[in-house]
Amino acid sequence: MTSSLLFLLLGFVLLYFGGEGLVRGSVALALRLRLTPLIIGLTVVAFGTSSPELVVSIKAALNDQGALAIGNVIGSNILNIGLILGLTAMIYPMKVQLQVLRIDVPIMLGVSLLVVWLLSDLRLGRVEGGLLLAGLLAYVSFTVILAKKLKPSAEVEAEYAEAIPALRGSVWRDVTLILCGLALLVAGSHFIVDGAVSLARGFGVNEAIIGLTIVAMGTSLPELVTCVVAALKKEPDIVLGNIVGSNLFNLLGILGAAALAKPLIGTGIRMSDFLVMIAFTIALVPILWSFRKLQRWEAVLLLVGYVSYLAWRWPK
């Protein structure tokens, strides 16, 4: 049991630093390609913070642990809204200003419903995986075009410009950061998958529960750090952009890539897990479509909802 926990802890540390390196290198390359900070924030950063979920889910799929791969994605999406958004809104009540996010949230809800329908038999094959990845390409293209067309406010542009670090060094430094980040992510995923499976057997629970809870928490560390820092700087659009972008990448990119690597079978995942993810997603729609802030009392409700889900889902 102790060795399993140490494996998980080591894996989470490697994933965190690997994700940091990948995001920093990718952002620098995007700046060299003259992408705007807004587009980088909505795509590169949001997707980069989900890289730990990507490598862990692909590793789990290749090891015939489909429940761990699916549980990691579903659990991460629930955690992103319930825990991370709840915590950051407790720090700084937020009001979204960026119009593109009000469009992305209904898209996220539609994609969530699609994924639940595809996984209604707890199986996801290569054809479905390919369709999800095609959906990701379409979403990225749509986001870039829309971000260029809709002129954001000066305040929003300043938020994203401040959050994107200035270019340093050469392109080789960026490539090195990306490669080192990927190497750490692969190594971390190895420790996490092995540790999670051992921990599940030690507790006598199935891999789906470990994926929905412990693994989802560990792989969501980059999103947590990014959102907390943005909240402390009073940058609500970055918080929401990261959460929405990460959730969409989880559903389209991670499940799609994992299913392409090897068809997934989600033994142990319940329909109620999907419904909880849908419920948290629906909760974001009125928040982002109205012009009011996400208040602290609403953040408390999100946090209580997430803790209640964990308490209900963990076997007694």
Image: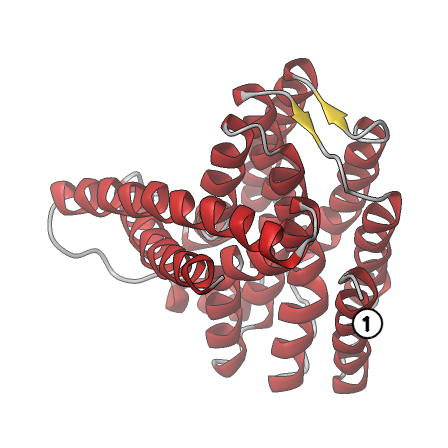
Q: Residue at x 60, y 50 (%)?
A: 201
Q: Is residue 264 left or right of residue 49?
A: right
Q: Is residue 84 left or right of residue 60?
A: right
Q: Position of residue 237 (x, y in %)?
A: 59, 65
Q: Residues within 10 Å of mark 1 (few under 14, many from 20)?
A: few
Provide the residue designation for mark 1: 308
Observer-nearest of 191 and 296: 191
Q: Where is residue 197 in the image (x, y as percent from the top left)?
A: 55, 46
**Element type at mark 1:** helix
* As drawn, 128 above or below 204: above
Kind of residue indicated by mark 1? Ser
Observer-nearest of 246 and 51: 51
Q: Position of residue 205 (x, y in %)?
A: 70, 52
Q: In this view, does 49 lie to the left or right of 179?
A: right
Q: Is residue 294 visible?
A: no
Observer-nearest of 204 and 314: 204
Q: Can residue 245 be seen in this view?
A: yes
Q: Residue furthest top?
A: 127
* As drawn, 27 above or below 130: below
Q: Where is residue 28 in the image (x, y as percent from the top left)?
A: 27, 49
Q: In which quarter of the image is residue 69?
A: top right
